[in-house]
Image (cartoon, rainbow, N blue to C red):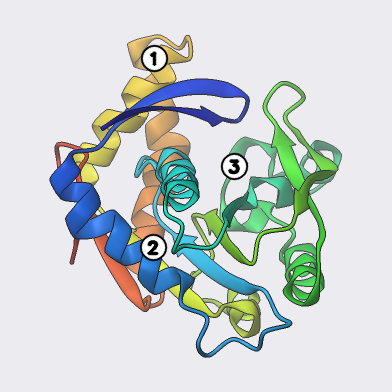
């Protein structure tokens, strides 16, 4: 299947085989959308954690699309974690601006408060502005009965990020070969205008350590997918 998806304001062409959709994506969505253990007045919150380069944004946009095509599935809404970056002024003050994207550069307390609010009713969610490189508050209206919060650090095994556990009804993790992620992330930076040397330097400074930290220090998820070298997904 070829489908055009809108991600961060850009239209992206995505491709998924019919076999992968039938064997992986639809069964997974039916499982994630199951609300048997969730009180009827509460929203189901799913954490999707994965290292950079695993295609989280495209994948979850595709899941939203699939859910809209299936009358047996509820609406599913993706909520990116990037809107909970600390503002650049705060990062500068704490010497963390060069490490933006690392777990220490996110406002976890603010994320917990937003999760608490949306669990019991409709609410607002911030979005990261890639032009201003800062969050925009209340940019997303949360309305779907099932939401997928996606980010790198949601299952990080430390006290700060473990504080989010009470808001997670189901968790999902994506594994991937580090060599594949390195190639994808360097290619992404080159496509964004960096030279090959600049892209490799960025990977060594930022993306590479984040990939290793996510893969090595994330808590086990309820469901794990593996992204193959070709970019397909399968159950682990």
Label 3 crowd (10 A; few <14 / some 14-19 / many >=20):
some
Residue 38 in the image, given as x and y percentages of width and height:
59, 86
Cα–Cα span, label 2 and label 3? 34 Å
Above or below, comparing residue 160 to residue 140 in the picture: below
Give percent across and percent down for residue 77.
60, 53
Q: Which mark is residue 29?
A: 2
Q: Which is closer to the viewer, label 3 or label 1?
A: 1
As drawn, the label of residue 99 is: 3
Q: Which mark is residue 190?
A: 1
Label 3 – label 1 distance at C-alpha: 19 Å
Q: Are marks 2 and 3 in contact (CB under 8 Å)?
A: no
Residue under the image location 52 percent in, 67 percent down: 47
Name the spot of residue 39 as percent of width and height, x first: 65, 89
Q: Earlier in the sequence, mark 2 or mark 1?
A: 2
Task: Say left or right for 29 vs 147.
Answer: left
Task: Name the secondary structure under disc 1.
Answer: helix
Look at the numbered discs 3 and 1 and tell me whether their residues touch, using CB distance below 8 Å: no
Label 1 CA crowd tier, 10 Å (few <14, some 14–19, many 20+) = some
């Amino acid at each position: 299947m070829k489908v055009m998806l809108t991600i961060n304001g850009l239209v992206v062409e995505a491709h998924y085989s019919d076999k992968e959709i039938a064997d992986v994506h639809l069964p997974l969505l039916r499982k994630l959308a199951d609300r048997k253990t969730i009180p009827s007045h509460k929203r189901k919150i799913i954490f999707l954690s994965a290292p950079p380069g695993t295609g989280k944004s495209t994948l979850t946009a595709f899941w939203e699309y699939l859910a809209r095509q299936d009358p047996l599935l509820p609406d599913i809404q993706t909520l990116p974690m990037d809107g909970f970056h600390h503002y650049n002024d705060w990062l500068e003050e704490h010497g963390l601006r060069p490490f933006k994207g690392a777990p220490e550069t996110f406002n976890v307390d603010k994320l917990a408060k937003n999760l608490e609010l949306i669990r019991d009713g409709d609410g607002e969610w911030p979005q990261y502005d890639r032009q201003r490189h800062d969050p925009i508050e209340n940019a997303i209206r949360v309305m779907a009965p099932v939401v997928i919060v996606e980010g790198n650090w949601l299952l990080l095994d430390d006290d700060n990020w473990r504080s989010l556990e009470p808001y997670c009804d189901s968790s999902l993790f994506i594994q991937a070969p580090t060599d594949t992620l390195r190639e994808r992330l360097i290619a992404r930076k080159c496509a964004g205008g960096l030279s090959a040397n600049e892209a490799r330097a960025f990977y060594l400074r930022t993306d590479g350590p984040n990939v290793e930290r996510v893969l090595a220090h994330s808590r086990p998820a309820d469901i794990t997918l593996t992204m193959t070298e070709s970019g397909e997904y399968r159950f682990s």
